[in-house]
Amino acid sequence: MRCPRCGWPESKVVDSRPSESNEAIRRRRQCMQCGARFTTYERREELPLVVVKRDGRREPFDRQKIMHGLVAATVKRDLDVAQLDRLIDDVEQKLRDGGVLEVPSKQLGEMVLLALKDVDGVAYVRFASVYRDFKDVDEFREELGRLENGQ
């Protein structure tokens, strides 16, 4: 790390602690040449997630698309946006923890469905009806049966 005052390439770490948001490590450094102190932040590099669509197209992971579907599924349900945001965070974190850089849209949808199932049964069935493209009432009944049987 180069000193911002003199440009010397060597410094020593004087203090190290998590940042206020716990998103980075805050380090106080001291230049080995001029003695100036400065702060650096060390963050984890996030690689972009890519969603592979059914037709083979690839597009960036878009939280807003998932949120839009979840909001539509939870209309008039007692769920707030913060809960839905946490649900999306959990799904995204599971993908990142698994080292996944590309995820098929079908797998992503199933992960969202599984997470939603634990939050609200009605919203789960609503989301499933759109995601799985239910064609008739029988498909609703089958899904409700699976939900009731804990599958």
Image (spheres, helix red, strand yellow):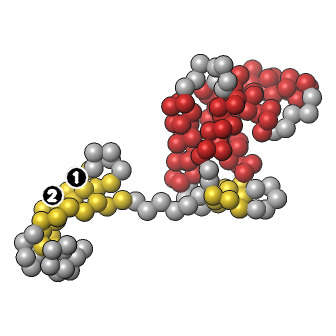
Residue position for label 2: 15
Amino acid type of disc 1? Arg
Q: Secondary structure at mark 1?
A: strand
Q: Is residue 107 above or below residue 37?
A: above
In the figure, is residue 51 to the left or right of 97? right
Q: Quadrant of the C terminus?
A: top right
Q: Dot 1 corresponds to which residue? A: 17
Residue at left offset 76%, top offset 56%: 53
| Place of residue 86 in the rendered image (x, y in percent of width and height, measured from the top left) | 51, 36
Residue type at numbered disc 2: Asp
Q: Quadrant of residue 104?
A: bottom right
Q: Report crowding for label 2: few under 14, some 14 to 19, many 20 or more residues within 10 A (C-alpha).
A: few
Quadrant of the snapshot with the N terminus: bottom left
Q: Residue furthest left?
A: 35
Tag 1 and tag 2, C-beta contact below 8 Å: yes
Circle 1 residues within 10 Å: few <14, some 14–19, many ≥20: few
Q: Residue furthest front?
A: 5
